[in-house]
Image: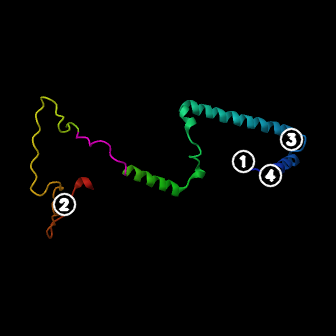
Amino acid sequence: MVGINGYEFILLALIAVVILGPERLPEYASQLARLVREVRRMASGAREQLREEVGPEIDEVDWRKLDPRQYDPRRIIKEALLDDVHDAVKPVSGRPSAAPGTSAPGTQSPGAPSPSPAPAAAPGTAGRPPAVKPLERLGAGQPAPFDIEAT
């Protein structure tokens, strides 16, 4: 947790005995014990307050997943890219819904006027997108159109 092994702890204790002296060491040890108890009490109080404010969902959080030491940009990018692929290849369930205010064919409410038939498509264009209008070129010396709201 702190990163101090046994030998380092013994060395720190010997340095404390030499610096503080045997007569003041018990007093400082008791102060250190009180400080540790107070810090633990404050941490548990903060944990309880967080649990009260957030609710029982806080117990379900996987804190190891949120650990910054687990951060691996390659894994995160790979997961994000795979999530997009899985979302993109999901099969569509059901039929596409009709536009708002319209009903699906064959589900017309009684008493409602029948919709007018759609204009007939030109022969040979069934299922094709509408034709695209060709670009119009400006003549020589003709100024370009200016949109005051676009600038």
Q: Earlier in the sequence, mark 4 or mark 1?
A: 1
Badge 4 amino acid:
Glu
Residue at 86 percent of width and 38 percent of height: 26
Vertical comparison of 47 with 85: above or below: above
Q: Label 4, on which residue? A: 8
Q: Position of residue 60 (x, y in %)?
A: 55, 37
Q: Quadrant of the C terminus?
A: bottom left
Q: Label 1 belongs to which residue?
A: 2
Q: CA distance from mark 1 to mark 3?
A: 22 Å
Residue pictured at 14% horizontal, 29% vertical: 110
Please tell me the numbered disc located at residue 15: none
Dot 2 corresponds to which residue?
145
- The magenta-colored residue range is 89-99
SS type, badge 3: helix
On screen, residue 86 versus residue 123, left or right, reads right
Secondary structure, magenta segment, majority class: loop
Mark 1: secondary structure = loop
Tag 4 and tag 1, C-beta contact below 8 Å = no
Vertical relation: 136 (above or below) 40: below
Q: Which residue is mark 3?
A: 25
**Residue positioned 58% across, 50% down in the render:** 68
Residue ID at (14%, 54%) = 126
User: Which quadrant of the figure has residue 35?
Assistant: top right
Task: List the single residue furthest toward the right.
Answer: 22
Please name the amino acid that badge 2 sits on.
Pro
Report the mark closest to the observer, 4 or 2. Answer: 4
